[in-house]
Amino acid sequence: MLEASSPQQIDDLPGWRTSWEQDKLDRKRTLWRDRLREWSGWDRLTGNCHVALSDQDKTFSGQYQAMQCRPGYVDADESELPDFDTSLKQAADLHGFGPIPLLVISRDPSKDPADSLEQVDSTQIWQKEQEDSKHLSPSSWRVIANGSRHMVPLDRPDLVVSQLTLLVNDVRTGQAPNYGTTSAK
């Protein structure tokens, strides 16, 4: 699980449910407009092939800009939005995987903005939910990716590869990592 969603996050994280519900409404209103602008080539013709990025996403500027104005990428996340709440409810019904090895890799909480009490609460809740996901298997461990934000595979590919190698070796050889632990690397 790489910085994976939690079944409780939509209701536990301050403001998430309200934000998600508003996003669903906004996206329905803009979906066809966005598709028409991209499919017709309007945005390319008018030079609107750039996306405004948050400070956190600036690292991925090249990737996001390359996806802009390509019809195949228009509202690519739209398919998950309507069913996100249903998926979370289904995931909440899962209480364990049994002894299947489970690796949880989470972002560095020190990289979360702490501009408000709500953001501090969100960071603490997110970290608790990441920690709780270890309970899905007695053969689990968690690693906090030092220096990484939400996009752990992009921020710390070295860590992802090394930890996945441990997971694969565990499955192949039975040489178990230190189950039940949480470490920062």
Image: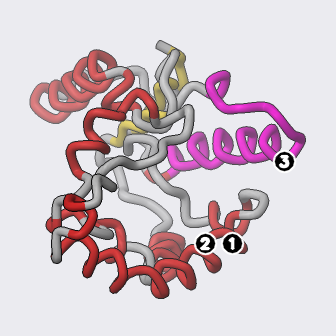
Q: Is residue 133 magenta?
A: yes
Crowd band around label 1 with a 10 angstrom C-alpha radius: few (<14), some (14–19), many (20+): some
Question: Cα distance, mark 3 to mark 2?
Answer: 16 Å
Query: Which contiguous range is marked in magenta?
Result: 109-135
Q: Amino acid at mark 1?
A: Arg
- The residue lying at 44 percent from left, 75 percent from top is 81
Q: Which residue is mark 2?
A: 20
Q: Quadrant of the N terminus?
A: top left
Name, please, the residue furthest toward the front.
46
* Circle 1 residue: 17
Q: Earlier in the sequence, mark 3 or mark 2?
A: 2
Vertical arrangement, residue 144 with respect to residue 3, above or below: above
- Image position of 142 with respect to 38: above or below: above
Q: Nearer the viewer, residue 109 or 61?
A: 61
Q: Which quarter of the figure has residue 60?
A: top left
Residue 99 versus residue 152 in the image, above or below: below
